[in-house]
Image (cartoon, grey):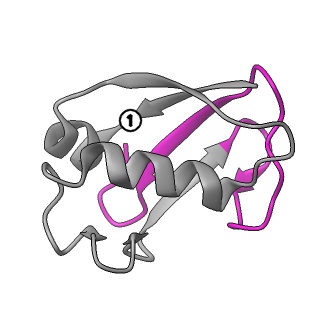
Amino acid sequence: MRVEVKFTGLLAYELRAQEASYELAAGSLVSDLLAIIGRAFADRLPPSLYDPETETFHRMIALVRRDHGFLSPTEPLADGERLLMLSRAAGG
């Protein structure tokens, strides 16, 4: 399945990207997508946002689904989704 992610605020600045598309296996979770994004941009993310050893983002980084608010790592993704990734502290 394909998922589109728009980066905002501090993340867009650090990643030097506004958006990206990702191919994931059917049944993938938010945590799977976060892991892919982290690995793809690990060299651009400061330690205050991402820990490459544990492959985890800081808790202030969130994915948002339109009309559903912040997503938990255990939520499933759907093909064709458009998500927003932001820093809760910096806004978008």
Residue 34 in percent (x, y) is at: 52, 55
Callout 1: few (<14), some (14-19), or many (20+) C-alpha neighbours within 10 Å? many
Q: Is residue 21 above or below residue 39?
A: above
Q: Is residue 70 magenta?
A: yes
Closer-to-camera residue (47/67):
47
**Foreground: 20 or 6?**
20
Classify 82 as above or below 60: above
Q: Where, quadrant-wise, is the N terminus in this rendering?
A: top right
Residue span colored magenta: 65-92
When asked about the image quadrant of residue 17, the answer is: top left
The residue that mark 1 highlights is 7
Main secondary structure found in the magenta portion: loop
Residue found at x 39% / y 70%:
55
Label 1 sits on what residue type? Phe
Residue 72 in magenta stretch: yes
Q: Is residue 2 left or right of residue 91?
A: right
Which secondary structure lies at badge 1?
strand
- 3 with respect to 6 (left or right): right
- Residue shown at the point (84%, 37%) measured from the top left: 26
**x and y, in percent, of residue 29 in the image:** 75, 54
Q: Is residue 76 left or right of residue 24?
A: right
Q: Position of residue 88 (x, y in %)?
A: 43, 63
| Rendered residue at 22%/49% (across/down) | 10
Q: Quadrant of the C terminus?
A: top left
Report how many numbered discs are placed on residues in the image: 1
Quadrant of the image occupied by residue 80: top right
Residue 84, position as x, y percentages in the image: 54, 38
